[in-house]
Amino acid sequence: MDYPIWNLVFGGGVLIGIVAITHVLVSHFAIGGGFAIAFIETLAVRRRDPALRGLAKRSSLMLILVSTVFGAISGVGIWVTIGLVQPAATSALIHNYVWGWAAEWGFFILEVATALAYYATWDKVRPRTHLLIIWLYVFAAYMSLVVIQGIISFMLTPGRWLETHSFWDGIFNPSYLPGLALRTGICLFLAGAYLTLAALRETDRTARVGMVRLLAVFQIVGVLLAYGGYRWWEHVLPESVKAIFLGSKALLPALASTRYFVLWALTVYLLLSLFALAAPRLHRWPTAVAALLAAFAFFGGYERLREGSRKPFVIRDFMFSNGILVSEIADLNQRGVLSKAVWAARENPGPEGKGVAVFRAQCASCHTLDGYLSIRKLVAPVDPDMLNGILATMREEGNEYVSGRYTDKGHVATDKLDYPLMPPLVGTDDEVEALASYLLTLRPSNVAEANHGK
């Protein structure tokens, strides 16, 4: 709202999803993989097992490439995309959690330094010193997750922070621990899935069987922990969030389907992990790759479900997806939304441009003209009188958000609204009328008439 909207044909949210899901798939391996490699080398030193030590050494290069190269690049990519697509929310996260981010970046620097030192000191330092380096890496990597989880979960379940605005209330929000348990399980099973591919390169059949069985234990423990964390996560969600994807009448059927997909993907992964444990000799490349894909499917599906559950907010009950704060609705209804989105008014001067400016300020964060969630396709079948009624209802719901701000223990019951997955329409009567007039020009009949007049 305070910043210009970056328009993308396929939608800014889709871009964030692509970059973020790609990043978390490697960053969570960087955590779990570090723990698995540390555990394997520790076991190898105690048992004096050269095959296990060879697995740790082979896997360390993968860890370096994933953690310090791709993980770092994709992490920067997330900051770039969220800064362009959701600048107001990014600013809010920085201002509220600047010391949290500082701590996370400090842990990440330690993570990169120890990863590089670990790989560079193979066969050059004493085994205990080498183990100290990798366990220090594990500590730094996991502490990075501990901090990030607090900020990520805050966006969906801010909890008491809505009243106190306390750093610690925001970090230790209702879904913090469930999400941390879930992500810890994901770290473990991703480590098992990735390292199994390295284990299958072992030429000694007896050693390979032992490695596959050991890594299957990592995967099974990770799946069970992730499943428990997921169920716990669902349990602590506010009812207004659950209504979006749970129950026979879920507000967003696509998210309800995603939930079933997520649970089935985890079930498939568990079965493949049990197969690896029971028949390690038969667990070869096809089943190992299938297990990795099932792990990706679960994690990617969960991230989509978690992000979609925030609708219509970017920070639940605090900031809508278009950057409007719940607390400023009443004021913007009096002064006008363009008094806040000054950039939109300047980009579209004149009375005929007011409707375009209001659309850009309130709608363009989710809707494109002809691409993702095309507004032209949405208004095409709508009768003009019906469109005016829809906009009027959405504007009235802005007042409902204000009056119901602290009901339901601080959470707005969005499932009781006519348009629960869209931010309420905010602004003066003139701005709403201007928006309606602009949307009507996008209807095919109006476009044809305009072309005919030319």
Image: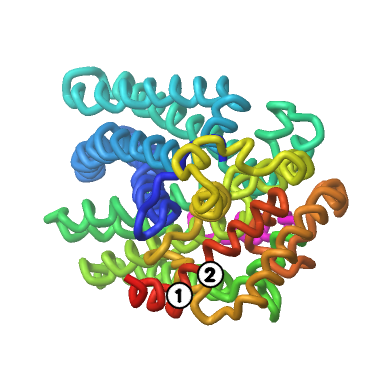
Q: Say what secondary structure mark 1 lies in.
A: helix
Quarter of the image with the N terminus is: top right
Q: Position of residue 307 (x, y in %)?
A: 54, 55
Magenta span contains residue 235: yes
Q: In this picture, which residue range is highlighted in magenta? A: 221-238
Q: Say what secondary structure mark 2 lies in.
A: helix
Amino acid beneath label 1: Asn
How crowded pointer 2 is (Cα within 10 Å; few <14, some 14-19, many 20+) is rated as many
Query: Which residue is farthest left?
Result: 203
Residue 39 seen in the figure: no
Query: Which residue is farthest front?
Result: 453
Which residue is located at x 43 percent, y 77 percent? 444
Q: Position of residue 321 (x, y in %)?
A: 58, 50
Labels 2 & 1 near each other (Cβ < 8 A): yes
Which residue is located at x 48 percent, y 54 percent? 222
Residue 321 seen in the figure: yes
In the image, 218 versus 313, the foreground residue is 313
Badge 1 is on which residue? 446
Which residue is located at x 47 percent, y 63 percent? 301
Badge 2 is on which residue? 440
